[in-house]
Amino acid sequence: MGIYWKRCATPVYLAASVAIVDQLSKFAVKSFIAPDEIIEVLPCFNLVFRLNPGVAFSMLDNINYGHYILAAVALVVILFILSLFLRGKAPKSRNGTAALGLIMGGALGNMIDRLLPPDYAVVDFIDLYYKNHHWPAFNFADSCITVSALLLIVVCWKED
């Protein structure tokens, strides 16, 4: 059994690191930025404090107990990825392992937000924009999930 858990060590440590950095960044935002305050950092980048009870672009934000449903989905994703490593079905490359670890960490970071009172919502704080066109606010966990999903596509494409 030890060899199977050894396969999970790197992605689990990476996931824990991502979740910790994500939670620390959200704590800092909640501590130093007022809700709906905008702090201009660069001509295309602001720091903001937004609560997102839904998923990307605030979809599904009006569903009763949606935060529990979305937290359960994140848990299923995390357990599925862990099962890939335990069964030896995960990509063999370092990039594949890193991508899956980052996805787990991002899912864990956002899952924690959805389960914590009083908000039961994900804290978003990165606001990228061009002129008056703003991308919906997002966070560190979202960034890890998105970049890692793209990396995983490349890894899987190369392994085929």
Image (cartoon, grey):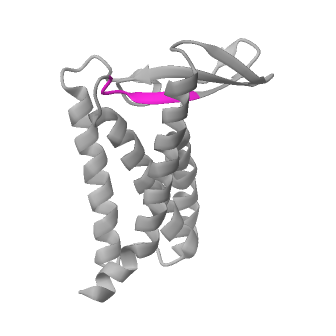
On the image, the x and y values in percent for residue 83 come to: 28, 68
Front-most of residues 47 and 156: 47
On the image, the x and y values in percent for residue 65 come to: 19, 26
Total count of labels: 0
| Residue at 77 percent of width and 15 percent of height | 131
Front-most of residues 13 and 44: 13
Q: Is residue 124 magenta?
A: yes
On the rendered structure, is 45 left or right of 108?
right
> Looking at the figure, which quarter contains the N terminus?
bottom left
On the rendered structure, is 82 left or right of 11?
left
Tell which residue pokes out farthest to the right in this image.
43
| Vertical side of 2 occupied by 41: above or below | above
Bounds of the magenta segment: 119-125
| Residue at 40 percent of width and 66 percent of height | 12
Q: Quadrant of residue 15?
A: bottom left
Front-most of residues 21 and 90: 21
- Residue 111 appears anywhere in the view: yes
Q: Quadrant of residue 70?
A: top left
| Residue at 46 percent of width and 24 percent of height | 57
On the image, the x and y values in percent for residue 79 come to: 27, 59
| Vertical side of 101 occupied by 92: above or below | below
| Residue at 48 percent of width and 78 percent of height | 92
Tell which residue pokes out farthest to the left in this image.
64
- Residue 137 appears anywhere in the view: no
On the rendered structure, is 76 left or right of 153?
left
On the image, the x and y values in percent for residue 80 come to: 28, 60
Front-most of residues 135 and 119: 119
